[in-house]
Amino acid sequence: MPHASSLARRYAEAYFELARDAKDIPGWRAELSAVVDALSSERVAPALSNPKLSLAERTRLGLKLLDGASDSARNLARLLIERHRLGLLPGILSHYDVLADREAGVVRAEVTAAIPVDKRLEKEISEALAKKIGKSVETTVLSDPSIVGGLVIRIGDRVIDDSVRTHLQQLQAALA
Amino acid sequence: MAIRSDEIGEILKQRIASFEAPVVDAHEGVITSVGDGIARIYGLEQAMAGELLEFPGPQGKGNVLGLVLDLREDAVGAVIMGPYEHLQEGDTVRTTGRIAEVPVGDELVGRLVNALGQERDDRGPIETAQSLPVERVAPGVMLRQNVDTPLQTGLKAIDSMIPIGRGQRELIIGDRQTGKTAIAIDTIINQKGTGVICIYVAVGQNAAKVAQVRATLEQHGALEHTIIVAATASDPAPLQFLAPYAGCAMGEYFMQKGGHALVIYDDLSKHADAYRELSLLLRRPPSREAYPGDVFYLHSRLLERAARMADSEGGGTLTALPIIETKANDVSAFIPTNVISITDGQIYLETDLFNAGVRPAINVGLSVSRVGGDAQTKAMKQVAGQLRLDLARYRELAAFAQFAADLDKSTRDRLERGQRMTEILKQPQYEPVPVGKQIIQIFAGARGFLDDIAIDRVADFERSLVRYMDQNHAEIEKDIVDQGKISEETEKALSAAIEDFKKGYAG
């Protein structure tokens, strides 16, 4: 997940508040995601920040790529082109997701296990987590044999680590 | 490969059996930049200011601790208290949920530790039952009372004219090589048998000097009541920054118990330098002399923790003797003026005096103690008043008299008296004088018994007098100490005894 700079967060918050007022958070996310896809590609981005082209021309070019997008998405793109802030787009999108999750009261957890986790176990884990945190949890399961056994759960920057690897390291430190 | 004693099977078995593997529940961040002992860490949204962080240790070693000093919107800045060369961008850092703390307790007494309270004298691990946070808020107004018990340094010049009370903050200031540390060491030696626990905090000193201080204390039997906290010049700046607070926390433990502690910070100039280094690396804006804006608070919050607690709080004391090194006698530099204004007085040492053979090289004109007077015994006050007066008159005349060819008798007498008084205040290192003997010596000078003794014989006279008094009139010293004042009878007896002694003294 790209990290959202404080600047990107401001744009994301503004766009998100508009989306919330329009009561269409998923719809506006799709629009935003389309803008990111269209304007952030390696081929398009340099052209849109090329100082040899006039601002009007760059804006026209950018908006042409967004034919069919909603007005608000187009306006956001225009604003970013005018302010030379196109680089913020991925950050805006990721922070939009954070805001949307917060609005919905959803917490995303990344669960790492040493063995593949089946659906039933995953459900059990996310229910246990939801109980512990008091919010609904959406889990993504990864498998990483290097943790040897147990689970490592990440929620934002919080880590709950009950892996055999970490316990072995603790034992090593205790005996050192 | 030799088997170490802690690798004996039984011990290993015990440690493995008693090993508990707690589930790690922490916040994790990623290092975005690292260097010069400073790391910037992305994430760690929940980190607290002053919280300890766990950095991965070098290959095969335990974790390295860090300290959060900077909280920003996206990142925290932390100082790394240990080796950092192995750390890389992308390494993960975990919070510990603990504010920086050091072990405290009686077990530390007699030991040499670093700024984190870990042993550094190869005498085995230190197991204490308790820890205290390194940074604490100083006791409030209602928890304190006035300083009223003397803390005897054993130095005549200080105990008579710049008295220090338990719970006071008295600055020792002077250029390099003027005997600042010597005063501190003498004071520690003189606390033997008084129940005052001494904590010597060495900040940015070379390790050889710390070793020397430790050896000196050991030689004079003063290590048994002393803790040495050493952050030497080769220790990273964060440890040098932390050491005075750690030493203070160790002292506060004794104060809280209702006991008495004395902390010596040697020296706060280097402490300010270490903090300047950290602040500049953390990109805080520099102010005067490139010190950060909060360098005053750095020292004021440390020294404010020295206190004399109210009787309801146990009545313990923590006395602080900070040391400041000036450059070329410049007391108006930033750090010296700051610390002068924080403390309750200063002992001012001068190179010129030192070179002229006045040791301790205390400038009694510029040195003051703002609260210690209340703590002085009445007996000392009775003799010190005359001493101060004689010396003030002497100083006034001394410079002027250098030009005058012939002086009238009264001027000459004043000069002669002043020279003898200065001579009385000279004192060899590591020979603290008990307060009763100090009073007898100063009494002899102030009442003019020395006026007909040659100046170069004064030191010998004083020594012989004390020996004579011990052998023939030990009750006089006892009277003075017990009564806390010189009564009329004692004064008569003392004068007569000194007269007697002078008759037999072949000066």
Image: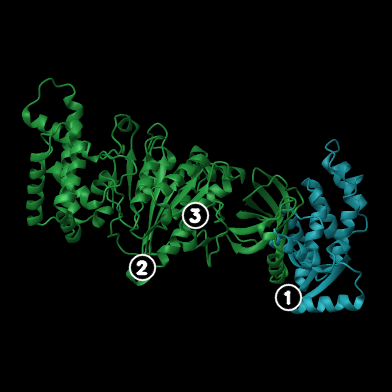
Chain colours: A cyan, B green
Q: Is residue B276 shown left or right of residue B168?
A: right
Q: Amino acid at mark 1?
A: Ile
Residue A143 in sight: yes
Distance (Cα) linking label 2 and label 3: 34 Å
Which of the marked residues, 2 or 3, is nearer the chain's N terminus? 3
Which quadrant of the view contains residue B349?
top left
Q: Which residue is mark 2?
A: B142
Residue at x 33% of width, y 59% of height: B194
Crowding near pointer 2: few (<14 within 10 Å), some, many (20+)?
few
Residue at the far top in the pictured view:
B405
Element type at mark 3: loop
Residue A144 in sight: no
Element type at mark 1: helix
Which quadrant of the view contains residue B423?
top left
Q: Nearer the viewer, mark 1 or mark 3?
A: 3
Return the mark for residue B338. none
